[in-house]
């Protein structure tokens, strides 16, 4: 098809799924020309270019990344025929708001299905995904890798992309030690996902080109563990698709994209955090799973918080620092550190908003559901410095850090601080191992 006849495409994304979909589908399509990426959620990405070295010979200048708020102007200026959504954890209403903007501007609106975008591995693949950001994928992934190691399987963890640095330098990254996090200049968001795996002894891969990443991981592993991001679909075709649901947000399993798709595709649904959720909400989620995916097996699990010195919390004025994405686009109003503060008798949870510095103030203006918790935002050095300044400005006796990353390795916290950790705990131990064994046996045949 001639260049003039190719359909002109704008991809709406957030520096992850959008790049993957381009690599595996749009890059080689003779019928389409991608004329722009847009970005939302991720600071510092707008104005950058998806490089020619990754975009391929049809894109010698690369592809510019624009602000999503410019969508209507971009459709007109670039004569776009199609707008394609390629990022995760959006309400169904938000998806259709974006569709309506595209349609009103004269473009078609499209979503790609998993068959067009998922890669096939030569190894069995276990995928851990979720219905919402912050449901407990990471602890579930670590739990699954421990089961696989007990089965004498060599595991390679592949993490959903977070290419917030220099994109050409992040094509295929391999992490085996904590020093690798420093070598690749990882953001707090990357460290939150990678560091717990490294501490558990897992080798982890991430980056931009997931075909290359998959083939590299296959060379080291008997089983590939896909550790999903937000509530996105797996990039690899899973032999076992595990999806985590959160009864603290009962009802969300049918109201967010692509979390609902994950739920409908799942072989196994883990309803997490049952120990701190209301029993009525656990039952609401169980009923929804049974209705939407009656073939899925359901496992109930707890996510107990652990603090090394819980007695240090009682009677103290505490600052609660939580995982950033869980609070922001995950829309949670609290996390593990907040639960620990209440469980162990903190006298007060201090409101950090009056002390927010720089872009941290912008986060509170954008996400108005946040009150007395501080999201550990850190997409770059400047924002990490602003997070440090915010923490140190808050008048408190103790900082409770509920992020999966050890913030003390990255910033200087002047207050006494305690980490709050959490792991998956099956209510009936052995169920997940049983499902894994069944599906790996099927994959082998």
Image (cartoon, grey):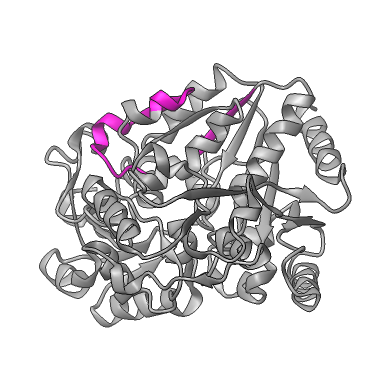
Q: Where residue 374 appears, x then y in whole percent? A: 41, 64
Q: Where residue 306 appears, x then y in whole percent? A: 66, 49
Please report the bounds of the magenta region as a residue range. 155-180
**What number of labels is visible?**
0
Residue 194 in the magenta stretch? The answer is no
**Residue 135 vs residue 310, the one in the foreground:** 310
Q: Residue at x 62, y 73 (%)?
A: 249
**Residue 343 vs residue 161, the one in the foreground:** 343
Q: In this view, does 226 lie above or below 257?
A: above
The quarter of the picture where residue 141 lies is top right
Q: Which residue is drawn at 56% across and 71% down?
A: 347
Image quadrant occupied by the C terminus? top right
**Residue 54 vs residue 155, the one in the foreground:** 155
Residue 170 in the magenta stretch? The answer is yes
Q: Residue at x 31, y 65 (%)?
A: 83
* Residue 180 in sight in this render: yes
Q: Where residue 232 appears, x then y in whole percent? A: 51, 55
Q: Is residue 354 above or below residue 218?
A: below
Q: Is residue 218 left or right of residue 380?
A: right
* Residue 112 in sight in this render: no
Q: Where residue 438 appears, x then y in whole percent? A: 84, 37
Q: Which residue is drawn at 47% across and 23% down?
A: 177
Q: Is residue 86 above or below residue 380?
A: below
Q: In this view, does 325 lie to the left or right of 364?
A: right
**Residue 374 vs residue 417, the one in the foreground:** 417
């Amino acid at each position: 098809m001639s260049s003039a006849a190719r359909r002109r495409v704008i991809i709406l994304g957030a520096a992850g799924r959008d790049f993957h979909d381009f690599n595996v589908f749009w890059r080689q399509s003779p019928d389409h020309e991608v004329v722009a990426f847009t970005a939302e959620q991720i600071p510092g990405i707008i104005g950058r270019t998806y490089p020619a070295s990754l975009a391929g010979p049809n894109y010698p200048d690369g592809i510019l990344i624009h602000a999503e708020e410019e969508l209507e102007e971009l459709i007109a200026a670039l004569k776009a025929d199609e707008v394609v959504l390629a990022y995760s954890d959006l309400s169904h209403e938000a998806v259709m708001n974006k569709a309506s903007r595209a349609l009103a501007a004269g473009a078609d609106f499209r979503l790609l299905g998993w068959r067009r975008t998922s890669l096939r591995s030569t190894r069995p693949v276990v995928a851990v995904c979720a219905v919402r950001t912050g449901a407990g994928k990471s602890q579930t992934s670590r739990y699954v890798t421990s089961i696989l190691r007990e089965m004498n399987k060599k595991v390679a963890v592949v993490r959903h992309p977070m290419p917030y640095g220099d994109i050409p330098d992040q094509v295929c990254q391999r992490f085996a030690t904590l020093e690798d996090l420093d070598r690749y200049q990882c953001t707090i968001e990357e460290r939150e996902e990678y560091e717990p795996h490294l501490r558990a002894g897992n080798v982890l891969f991430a980056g931009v080109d997931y075909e290359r990443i998959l083939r590299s991981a296959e060379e080291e592993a008997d089983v590939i563990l896909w550790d999903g991001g937000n509530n996105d679909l797996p990039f690899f075709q899973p032999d076992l698709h595990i999806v985590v649901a959160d009864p603290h947000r009962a009802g969300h399993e049918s109201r967010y994209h692509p979390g609902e798709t994950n739920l409908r595709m799942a072989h196994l649904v883990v309803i997490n955090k049952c120990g701190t959720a209301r029993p009525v909400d656990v039952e609401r989620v169980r009923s929804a799973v049974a209705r939407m995916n009656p073939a899925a097996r359901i496992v109930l699990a707890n996510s107990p918080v652990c603090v090394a010195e819980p007695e240090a919390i009682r009677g103290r004025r505490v600052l609660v620092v939580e995982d950033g994405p869980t609070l922001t686009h995950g829309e949670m109003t609290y996390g593990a550190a907040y639960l620990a503060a209440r469980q162990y008798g903190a006298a007060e949870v201090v409101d950090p908003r009056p002390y927010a510095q720089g872009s941290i103030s912008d986060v509170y203006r954008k996400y108005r559901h946040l009150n007395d918790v501080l999201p550990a935002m850190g997409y770059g050095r400047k924002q990490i410095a602003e997070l440090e300044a915010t923490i140190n400005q808050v008048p408190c006796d103790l900082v409770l850090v509920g992020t999966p990353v050890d913030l003390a390795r990255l910033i200087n916290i002047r207050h006494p601080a305690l980490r709050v950790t959490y792991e998956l705990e099956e209510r009936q131990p052995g169920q997940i191992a049983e499902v894994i064994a069944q599906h790996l046996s099927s994959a082998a045949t």
